[in-house]
């Protein structure tokens, strides 16, 4: 019996040390949403259970290594034991109760993250290889950054134009896949609680540039948000080329096409206009307005040598005629041949 009391004390000490130690490590980023509170509570409880189970096993082991080690001159086998019904009942019932308790906690936490606010406003989140677009459905404009007013629930509808992506802002804790296809929309509710700048990360392997599929998330005061919405509703200002720059960010063109000559998946737009390109059938073309336009609406129509294995998504399908022409203007403005 004295061994059990000693081990119990050892296990309690280890549990407390490891539990508080893990708590101090700061394994989670700052919490910045209402939905995240339930998740963090769940994490804290898990950490304590993990600390206890680890201590229970290691505590018994360490104690046995030290106290029951073979003494010099001891050659006999140890005592033989044959089962212990009481112990077996206890170690079946106790873990079962703990697991059931945690499944209950998990279900309530899930319900908590889905609690709907009837005043939530709608944003459609569109994932594409490899960028995010945010359609502010209530205000009829789109943005390449996600701006949210603080303390108001946003209902995010997730969708994708190509493969499966996953919307994840670590500070909000919640995460949701964005699936391609009609009727495959998934919803996620977020009520930000802290002003600040965050990042959406794609949390589903979606191709070569997956790791760089980021977008800015900015949580603002309600009045600042309303001001920003008003600015956006007029559409981007400036001439066609300036508008084209905004569209090309919004529709994710720049995820694959650089504008400074650097190497990405697709050809750079710097000095592309009026340059001569060799196609895979050996013929050459001079890049003009018509060629650029065609490359946006029908990317597979002509393939330039060296890009045989690159599949450009049909981005043009989700753009208006005007937006495409603006982007063409923008590409032209990046060339000295103008
Ligand atoms: Cu999109 Cu990974």
Image (tube, rainbow, N blue to C red):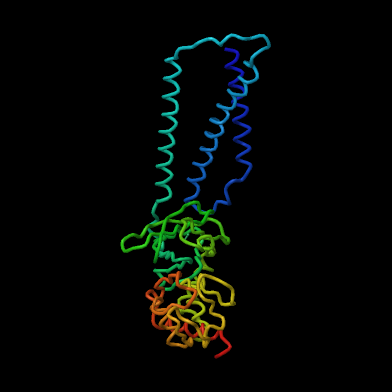
Which quadrant is home to the C terminus? Answer: bottom right
Residue at x 39% of width, y 46% of height: 111
Work out which residue is located at the far left of the displayed protein and give it.
Answer: 183
Q: Residue at x 51, y 67 (%)?
A: 145
Q: How many marks?
A: 0
Q: Please tell me in which quadrant of the rendered image residue 125 appears.
A: bottom left
Residue that extends furthest to the right in the rendered view of this protein: 72
Residue 264 percent coordinates (x, y): 54, 71
Work out which residue is located at the far bottom of the displayed protein and give it.
338
Give the answer, above or below, for where 129 lies relative to 174: below
Q: Which quadrant would residue 258 be assigned to in this image? A: bottom right
Where residue 200 appears, as percent x and y from the top left, is: 51, 60
Q: Quadrant of the N terminus?
A: top right
Left or right of 73 on screen, residue 261: left
Which sits in the foreground, 277 or 335? Answer: 277
Relative image position of residue 149 (x, y in whole percent): 50, 63
Q: Residue furthest front?
A: 282
Q: Residue at x 41, y 59 (%)?
A: 164
Nearer to me, 293 or 41: 293
What x and y, as percent, mark residue 205?
47, 57
Q: Nearer the viewer, residue 270 or 40?
A: 270
Image height of 278 relative to 224, above or below:
below
């Amino acid at each position: 019996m004295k061994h059990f009391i000693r081990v119990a004390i050892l296990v309690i000490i280890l549990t407390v040390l490891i539990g508080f130690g893990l708590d101090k490590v700061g394994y989670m980023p700052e919490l910045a949403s209402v939905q995240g509170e339930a998740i963090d509570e769940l994490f804290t409880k898990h950490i304590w259970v993990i600390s206890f189970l680890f201590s229970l096993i290691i505590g018994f082991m360490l104690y046995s290594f030290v106290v029951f080690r073979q003494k010099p001159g001891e050659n006999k086998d140890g005592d033989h034991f044959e089962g212990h019904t009481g112990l077996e009942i206890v170690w079946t019932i106790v873990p079962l109760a703990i697991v059931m308790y945690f499944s209950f906690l998990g279900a309530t936490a899930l319900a908590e993250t889905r609690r709907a606010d009837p005043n939530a406003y709608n944003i459609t989140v569109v994932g594409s290889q490899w960028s995010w677009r945010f359609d502010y459905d209530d205000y009829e404009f789109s943005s390449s950054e996600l701006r949210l007013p603080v303390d108001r629930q946003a209902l995010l509808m997730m969708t994708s134009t190509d493969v499966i992506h996953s919307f994840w802002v670590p500070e909000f804790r919640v995460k949701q896949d964005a699936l391609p296809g009609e009727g495959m929309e998934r919803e996620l509710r977020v009520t930000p609680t802290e002003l600040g700048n965050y990042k959406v990360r794609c949390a589903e392997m979606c191709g070569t540039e997956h790791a760089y599929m980021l977008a800015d998330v900015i949580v603002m005061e309600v009045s600042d948000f309303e001001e920003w919405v008003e600015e956006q509703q007029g559409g981007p200002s400036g001439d066609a080329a300036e508008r084209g720059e905004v569209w090309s960010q919004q529709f994710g063109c720049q995820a694959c096409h650089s504008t400074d000559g650097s190497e990405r998946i697709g050809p750079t737009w710097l000095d592309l206009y009026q340059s001569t390109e060799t196609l895979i059938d050996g013929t050459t073309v001079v890049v003009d307005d018509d060629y650029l336009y065609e490359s946006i609406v029908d990317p597979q129509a002509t393939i330039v040598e060296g890009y045989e294995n690159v599949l450009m998504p049909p981005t043009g399908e989700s753009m208006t005629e005007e937006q495409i022409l603006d982007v063409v203007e923008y590409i032209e403005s990046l060339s000295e041949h103008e």
